[in-house]
Amino acid sequence: MKDLTDDQKERSANLKGMGCSRKRVEDARFTQGKGNYVDDIKLPGMLHGDFVRSPYAHARIKSIDVSKAMALDGVVAVLTAADLAPLSLHWMPTLAGDKQMVLADGKVLFQGQEVAFVVAKNRFIAADAVELVEVDYEELPVIVDPFEALQSDVVLREDIADKKEGAHGPRKHHNHIFTWEVGQEAETNDVISNADVVATETVYYHRTHPCPLETCGSVASMDKVNGKLTVWGTFQAPHVVRTVASLLSGIEEHNIRVISPDIGGGFGNKVGVYPGYVCSIVASIVTGVPVKWIEDRMENLMSTSFARDYWMTGKIAATKEGKITGLHCHVTADHGAFDACADPTKFPAGFMNICTGSYDIPTAYLAVDGVYTNKAPGGVAYRCSFRVTEAVYFIERMIEVLAIELNMDAAELRRINFIKKEQFPYQSALGWEYDSGDYHTAWDKALKAVDYEGLRKEQADRIEAFKRGETRSLMGIGLSFFTEIVGAGPVKNCDILGMGMFDSCEIRIHPTGSAIARLGTISQGQGHATTFAQILASEIGLPADSITIEEGDTDTAPYGLGTYGSRSTPVAGAATAMAGRKIRAKAQMIAAYLLEVHDNDVEWDIDRFVVKGAPERFKTMKEIAYAAYNQAIPGVEPGLEAVSYYDPPNMTYPFGAYVCVMDIDVDTGVQTIRKFYALDDCGTRINPMIIEGQVHGGLTEALAVALGQEIAYDKMGNVKTGTFMDFFLPTAWEVPNYITDHTVTPSPHHPIGAKGVGESPHVGGVPCFSNAVNDAFRAFGLRHTHMPHDHWRIWQTANKLGLHG
Amino acid sequence: MSNKMHINLTVNGEAHEFLAEPRELLIYTLRERLNITGPHIGCETSHCGACTVTLNGKSVKACTMFIAQANGADVTTIEGIGSPDNLHVLQKSFREHHGLQCGYCTPGMITRASKLLEENPNPTEEEVRFGMAGNMCRCTGYQNIVKSILAAASEMNAAKEAAE
Amino acid sequence: MIPAPFDYHRPSDLKGVLALLQEHGDEARVIAGGHSLIPMMKLRMAEVPHLIDLQSIDSLKGISIAGTKVTIGALVTQHDIIDHPELGRVAPILKETSLQIADPQVRYMGTVGGNVANGDPGNDMPGLMQCLDATIHLIGPNGTREVAARDYYEAAYMTARDDGEVLTAISFDAPAGGYAYEKQKRKIGDYATAAAAVTIQKAGGKVASASIAMTNLSDTPVWSEAAGAALEGTTCDAAAIKAAVAAMLDDIDPTEDNRGPVAFKRHVAGIILTRAITRAWDRA
């Protein structure tokens, strides 16, 4: 690329396009308290809904008496399954091909399940009325363990007890949901039985929750005069919600308007469709006035969308020299009471088959068994693309266990197994085509940055000092190298409820050279209004500051599948670039006409078209925009607009190399993060400031999950972690400063080479923190210990290893 | 149903009088009665700090205070900390240093930070982290929040010195 | 999370408080900072038809220090303690403890009286007050009375205070010498996994006297006379500390919760106590 002139540099800088740390346009509102979140919405006559929830994890409902609640002044309605049944809305389809109760139909299957929906004049009366609804339960045996569920005579889902076939094939047991298999079973078993070395381990990825600071909620407003339903809600996929609402309610889609206003964090929690949304809509249809439903924090943690809960058993085979030859993985997946996982239809275990990781593993096999238990439904991708966090955690633990088996350094073991730069595009044994990567360069850069050898030396010295009784602190060096699979996805194999996972952008250039672009995605903090304008600024040569980005209103935005799975930049970002290019193509014709030359005689120069060889003759985009509306140009329609629906040819595969240095107090189990280095390669970087912020946040959510955050149940199915006293969200005090770094390996198939980044730090961070804890005890004989690594579990590890004397 | 009480409350310099049930939580008074929606609800158990306001000179969590207790109080919310034409240094600093993402915790963060800097105009990083530990953020990992507050402190101190 | 309705009272003197308590009996509760009671009411785990707010009772406010004699009014907040330089000099263990309670916003509201009065095993002040051999001042329909902090706690949420009584102040003779409040918790805002309050007076290179109490390891705070006695007359060497820890472990009775199983808690109790004693001795 030839060097830019000073004039070009200045014009380029004025655009604030891709690659600059543009300050966020969203912030003016948020810093002044002028965000507009769902609970901020207040409509005339609006009623409030609140749920009666089950205190039991498994019980038959013998009767529900709403009379006392109905008698309370200010109560408008109390809905139960019996009220919804005539509308066929007492059950609803899930994203995973199962169905789920909207309100308990005959029995409850998890603690916190929705039993009745009270609608009242305000939230205070609604809460009082909830207390007055009398439900007579008959307790049933509770199963919270998926292995027990597969052995038990207790039938959890009586509605499908005798169905031998589910949405994803045969069912083996009345509490079994599906078996999903990928890869070559016989070959893999063969490789494993003939291998020099095989490491076997069971790795449990505990149940947790995305827990955005804003809980879920909705406001539904049925206007009976014109037949229009408007729903505001915490929706990561508003267009899908509109389609689902139409299919469920029978209201034609053009009469439904779904709006995602500002969203206070999503992290996967706001992908699903929840009974609260449905009940607020039904209640508004019934009452004819707006109805608001906002869940409280306990309801959020107990009922809407857990994540993980995967028991993963692996066998990894290698030569004596450490070259991996095969990988076998079996997962027992606890899906809770209903299979409500938010995955593309053909992937009941998401993209778990990315579990060969960043390594050239020639033979592999994966099988996943989904199981029902008496726990909340969900199974969302908590800050990751569909089950990628589970997959990466699995392989990054297996690598460490294999390193122990081989008595090798885990960094070296990774290095000799990485997919090589020249192997891309790389076909994995479990069916993916990795688009681009340069893992060795990233790994070497990371290890050098942290002085890996020096750290190992320090660790060895610490171990000796520990053995001599001079310290009670051990040092763990956590390594992880991850490859994500994001940007779902090609319509040919990715859909949600039958809707292909493309995304969209529609651009209108205004006559004076400013613009509005609307997308099918919805920001939840990622800064779309800032970064998508940067993409466009670079593509169409208008300043980012002159471009408004709008999302989340289905009446105005083009159809899209929403924001999750790091798909906004890979898919909607691509659509934005492609739509921008359509604008530019038309602008070129207009410029050529204005400059009185042939279309091919002008060329693009940052913010203008110039006549080739005569750079003093040009038309800026601003001038072209004006001409598009004010000049009759033969053969060219007036106006300057474009829309693009982008179906990506492939996923994108961001990667990264992380190192964590942790000190562990053997006596108390207290861990301290001394250093964390994160190198991310997300391809082309649109806004480095925002990328860094995403990395900080993702790492902190990873820290939380690895070191203590869990949704725990007792044997009776009671949730033990229902408030922030017990559900671990770290504060500023518990969180370290992170060192961020990057390499840039653009995606070859993406219009601007960008791969997505929001979830990488979570995906790579969890194994890194966990590996640090495990590594600290490696010298004392530990192979593997399960997360979360909170104080008592670390203490227990040390205790079992005899380190307490 | 309990008796309603006569309540006087000053919010962001404006006096309000109304009748309310004593159990009405201050956060609902602000958000639903007075339409001051900057402070948010995050946890409802006084852990997350999204509802932080300044009440009679103290940083408090408005989800854990009944309006009856706040009767007669003087409250400042994010809406009273700066105005579009006269932003508080912290409001500018959070934008400058990317101290926010989804924005949900931000009003509570800035309101708390303003009080922290009043009490300790020149905090260390450690003091900022400790002094902000009553406010949770799920997006930023706090690194840029801490940076924003430290930068605001420097700027406020520089301005003070210049004025002296 | 919406509490049930209640009637609110804000009397301006203690007489008014006592009259309301008499009138409404166990339907009434007093509220100070409310950071224990309000969450319970919001979860509808505490039903309080009559809420009596103490905020206008000026006689419950303020810290008075006369020589080493310290009196802390029930409405003094943790923030007030942290922000009181003279108290910081006379009884620095109070500040050290207060800084380890909850978070800044909660410390602005949370009062010493509320922390001490309720008998919540998770609260930090009760153990501290037992360590300091503080006196709890109560007022009731029959006048005032004093109860030693070491006699005040009967079981979780059960104390020597009668329903008709109000805790007005806590007083103690601030000990000279070394002190430490050591607490292990999972994060800011958490109750202790284990916490220890220790004071040590030193004379002639030896422990002249020591007082030791621990928090959240039984259904009440645990002041262990034997633990303190184990240090007395020693040079606070490893053997003495070990003996003190052993004595304390005999007196605690932790239960399993999300912070961990009993064996872990007992082990951590020993470690935290060892650290607290070591630090207090270093400061003595």
Image (tube, rainbow, N blue to C red):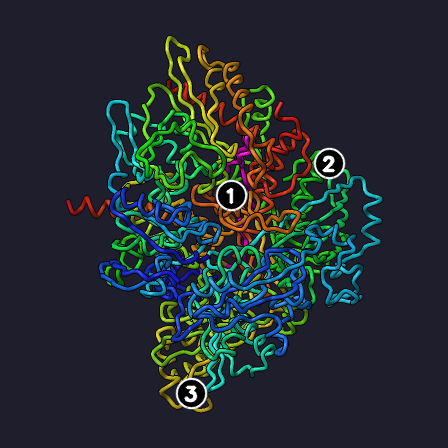
Query: Crowding at label 3, few (<14), some or many (≥20) Cα neighbours within 10 Å?
Result: some
The kind of secondary structure the magenta stretch mainly shows is strand
In the image, which residues are magenta? A658-684
Q: Quadrant of residue B44?
A: bottom left
Instruction: Answer left or right for A734 relative to A435.
Output: left
Magenta highlight on residue A681: yes
What residue is shown at x 81% (from left), y 43% (from top)?
Answer: A195
Of mark 2 and mark 1, the one earlier in the sequence is 2
Query: Crowding at label 2, few (<14), some or many (≥20) Cα neighbours within 10 Å?
Result: many
Seen in the picture, residue C234 relative to A185 is either above or below; the reply is: above
Magenta highlight on residue A634: no
Seen in the picture, residue A261 relative to A205 is either above or below; the reply is: below
Of mark 3 and mark 1, the one earlier in the sequence is 3
Circle 1: residue type: Tyr
Nearer to the camera, A503 or A152: A152
Using the image, tell me which numbered label, if any, was put on residue A406.
2
Using the image, tell me which numbered label, if any, was put on residue A638.
3
Could you tell me residue A324's position as x and y percent?
74, 45
Nearer to the camera, A697 or A619: A697
